[in-house]
Amino acid sequence: MDIIYTYLGPLTVWIIGLLILAAFVAGWIRRRRARVLRELNPRKITMKDIDRMEDGSEFETYLYRLLSELGYEEVYKTTGSRDFGADLVFTDRSGLRNVVQAKRYGLQSPVGLGAVQEIYASMNYYRAHKSIVITSGRYTDSCDILASANGVSLLDREDLEEIITLFKGRRAEKAMDIVEREPEPFTGGWKGDKLRKDDKKHG
């Protein structure tokens, strides 16, 4: 019994010390993450940080800084209340103006048709030649089809991760290749001869 009591004191102190250290480390990590998100520094931000962003405006600001750091010219972040469907505007390496819609979505909530419709509709207002949607998630099949039909480029989570990796590895040109990638070729579409029975009756 004497041996047990002898080691109970030091053991208790050791456990308490570990708990204090763990709490200190956890607090430091939380503060660091909060600071990184406040700064939105493209060289520090990871996909995990993007997933923790509280709203879409932080994602838009991050992409604005990322595109600027990549070396694009004339990068603008539009006004939230009157963006006319585009969150960002930039000029690519060919001198063409691009409009971008940013969607910070989770994998369980894919981006739908609205994103393609909005960014495509914004092109005339911004006098843009190309339109892009960038998401931290994925797209619905219908979104993929409509984007292909209208020449809208879709960049998903895997594309974004690759862009981030290339940027941090100082391979900006390769990252820009992904940003400027041509949209998927359109091979489908509506067949005009396939009318519904109701249409034939009224024809």
Image (cartoon, rainbow, N blue to C red):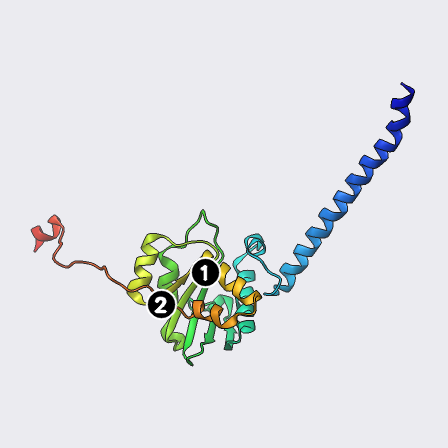
Q: Is residue 198 visible?
A: yes
Question: For mark 2, does the 10 Å Cα neighbourhood hold few (<14), some (14 to 19), or many (20 or more) residues?
Answer: many
Q: Which residue is mark 2?
A: 120
Which residue: 89% across, 18% down? 1
Residue 164 location (% of width, % of height): 53, 63
Residue 139 location (% of width, % of height): 39, 54
| Residue 196, numbered label | none
- In the image, residue 2 sits, relative to residue 54, either above or below, namely above
Q: Residue 9's quadrant in the figure?
A: top right
Identify which residue, 167 or 36, lies in the foreground.
167
- Label 2 sits on a secondary structure element that is helix
- In the image, residue 165 sits, relative to residue 202, either above or below, namely below
Identify which residue, 92 or 83, lies in the foreground.
92
Q: Which residue is mark 1?
A: 159
Identify which residue, 118 or 69, lies in the foreground.
69
- Label 1 sits on a secondary structure element that is helix
N-term-proximal mark, 1 vs 2: 2
Which residue: 53% across, 72% down? 70
Under mark 1, the amino acid is Asp
Residue 60 location (% of width, % of height): 52, 64
Q: Quadrant of the C terminus?
A: bottom left
Under mark 2, the amino acid is Tyr
Identify which residue, 14 or 136, lies in the foreground.
14
Residue 76 location (% of width, % of height): 51, 74
